[in-house]
Amino acid sequence: MNQIKERPTKLDIDKIRSDFPLLSRQMNKKPIVFLDSAASSQKPNQVIKSMDEYYEKQHANVHRGVYQLSQEATDAFEEARRSVQKFINAVEDKEIIFTRGTTEGINLVASSYGRKFLKEGDEVLISAMEHHSNIVPWQMICEQTGARLKVIPVSEKGELVMEEYERLLSERTKIVAVTHISNALGTINPVKEMIKKAHALNIPVLIDGAQAAPHQKIDVQELDADFYVFSAHKVYGPTGMGILYGKEHWLNAMPPYHGGGEMIKTVTFEKTTYNELPFKFEAGTPDIAGAIGLKAAIDYVEAIGHDKIQEHEAELLSYATNKLQDIAGLKIIGTATNKASVISFLVEGVHPYDLGAILDKLGIAVRTGHHCTQPLMDRFEIPGTVRASFAIYNTKEEIDKLAAGVQKAVNMLI
Ligand code: C6P
């Protein structure tokens, strides 16, 4: 019998908004319009409660006690790891390393992979649209090893110049590190294709997934990524918690990053032997509540469904693009064909900071400045932008308020 394929029904936005307590507060005596989820998303009750409950009923250190409470905490912590494994479709749970966030994940790989595999004359290939977190750690390890940083250029539309990428890949390239989605432009990069091209030359690839994990299904096996990093706090989870995924053979080949408890097998003053994966990279007491909060966030996102999230956010992006484009003098920076729900813009004759400050008075939270992508701002010869970013809880009414707010600010400032 033929099955009729149903289109996914739309999100119940009122229900979703009621899950996020912060969205009911006022800012500057106006209902808050939160359009800065690319910096950090708000948290649903389900995440907040999961962490409270852990502290109220389950807290003990993990992997250390024979007593029941410690066992329960360990089980919850390891269950969170398995939930991340499923979330990104990793082969093994030991390929999931808990970190403090995207920044720490990249620093771990740059330092650990770099110390083992980089030497003078080697090259690390990044792009001109990277966040500082995917530039500075590589600069630091290049300084230590004598390797050189190479940069894939960005076009006027805000897309990576793929011919240049192919030209820059060579036998000197020892790792490629690129962002999946640009935090400043919203560009979705063709990372699967880029990984394939790098792998043809046996070059491993790290993907900075900080801005992708909240918006689309991540499948590290399908991408064939060697390393994939993201932060919990942008996926409706807690701050201070992040994920480094690494293929088992790379993680096994790399030396530990931090030394201390948990990451060792045996210690004598003469010699230390290291623990197996994933513990080799998790020195010290981990953020147990953070892992439990991340699991609750993953459950929340999966219960809604990636299809519906993507459909809703694409609708917001196209609605906002049309609305903002109607404002005289407004220019959108980053017009890639494939974009996530992030819009950066400038208005002729108006400083982004002044615009942001007036929007704040209207209860509208947007980010202004260079968005930790100074080289990208230099590429476009601008000091910064105003950035509005949308999440599952945003509405078209909020975008109307943004557009009206921008128009009001422009009338005041020009
Ligand atoms: N971008 C933004 O407003 P951390 O701070 O470690 O959680 O994430 C760093 C990071 C790395 N890569 C990308 C692509 C990012 O967007 C971010 C964080 C925020 O755009 C804060 S600067």
Image: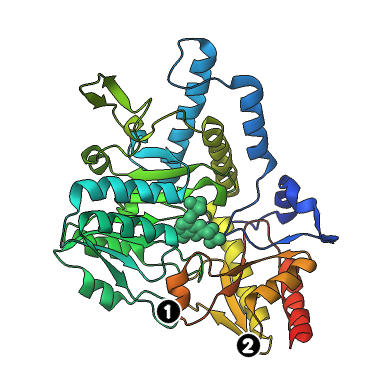
Q: Amino acid at mark 2?
A: Glu
The reply to whether discs 1 and 2 touch (Cβ–Cβ < 8 Å) is no
Q: Which residue extends farthest front?
A: 269
Query: Is 398 placed above or below 244 here?
Result: below
330 vs 212, left or right, is right
Q: Quadrant of the C terminus?
A: bottom right
Q: Who's the residue at 66% across and 83% down the image? A: 350
Query: Is 299 placed above or below 10 here?
Result: above
Q: Nearer the viewer, residue 235 or 15?
A: 235
Residue 337: tell me if it is visible: no
**In the image, is the residue at mark 2 within 8 Å of ligand 1 by its beta carbon?**
no
Residue 379 tag number: 1
Mark 1 or mark 2: whose residue is earlier in sequence: 2
64 vs 138, left or right, is right
Residue 378: % across, % down: 45, 78
Q: Nearer the viewer, residue 70 or 397?
A: 70
What coloring was used for the rendering? rainbow
Residue 47: % across, % down: 63, 39
The residue at which mark 2 appears reads as 348
Residue 259: % across, % down: 34, 32
Query: Is 332 placed above or below 81 here?
Result: below
Residue 110: % across, % down: 31, 51
Residue 265: tell me if it is visible: yes
Quadrant of residue 356 in the image? bottom right
Q: Amino acid at mark 1?
A: Arg
Residue 397 tag number: none
Q: Who's the residue at 60% across and 43% down the image? A: 300
How far, Cα to Cα, is label 1 from label 2?
A: 18 Å
